[in-house]
Image (tube, rainbow, N blue to C red):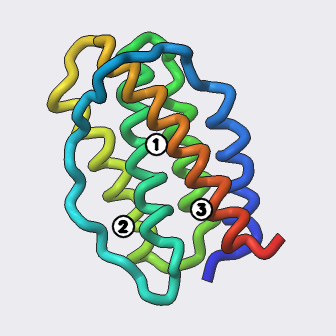
Amino acid sequence: MTTPQAWRALALLALLIAPMGGSVRAQSRPSAPAPPPPTVDPSAPYEPQLLRLAEIMGSLAYLRDLCGARDGDQWRARMASLMEAETGGAARKERLAGAYNRGFRGFETTYRVCTANARVVIERYIDEGGRLARDVGSRYGGG
């Protein structure tokens, strides 16, 4: 069961993600590394969304630093806050950390310099992450 602190962390994350977006647009959609299917805790119907959010945060920590934003530490801190607020047990925290690391390493292996595609991925992930955080908070937050 997720605590009210976890919902507050998600709400804060949604607010923090939105203003960080860039304004880069592209015609083609860049390919992102395909994540393996997550292991889902049946007692938490929102876990797939949390895992995706963690993966997005890991991706953003790497890509935004690569593209000069120098805020990777802030993404790591946001992830740490989410994990600290999560009370689903050690197994869920391990899955969240694994998803974050998968997002980080997936782009670390394919991007060595900032490209136009990397900027498009950043923008799309910021949009998706904000949407996920808002959806989970409003759907399962109870308030």
Instruction: State the image quarter where residue 109 is shown.
Output: top left
What residue sits right under mark 1 in the picture? 57
Residue 95 numbered tag: 2
Disc count in the image?
A: 3
The answer to which image quadrant residue 16 occupies is top right
Q: Residue reaching furthest right?
A: 143
Q: Quadrant of the N terminus?
A: bottom right
Mark 3 closeness class: few <14, some 14–19, many ≥20 residues within 10 Å:
few
Residue 2 lies, in percent from the top left, at: 64, 76
Q: Position of residue 125 (x, y in %)?
A: 45, 37
Disc 3 marks a residue whose amino acid type is: Glu
Task: Name the one closer to the observer, 129 or 3.
Answer: 129
Q: Quadrant of the C terminus?
A: bottom right
The kind of residue tagged 2 is Arg
Mark 2, Cα crowd under 10 Å, few <14 / some 14-19 / many 20+, is some
| Mark 2: secondary structure | helix
Q: Is residue 141 left or right of residue 49?
A: right
In the picture of the structure, the residue carrying the numbered disc 3 is 84
Residue at 22% across, 34% down: 31
Q: In the picture shown, does residue 126 fall above or below 54?
A: above
Q: Earlier in the sequence, mark 1 or mark 3?
A: 1
The residue drawn where x is 68% and y is 27% is 19
> Looking at the picture, does residue 122 appear above or below residue 4?
above
Q: Position of residue 121 (x, y in %)?
A: 37, 29
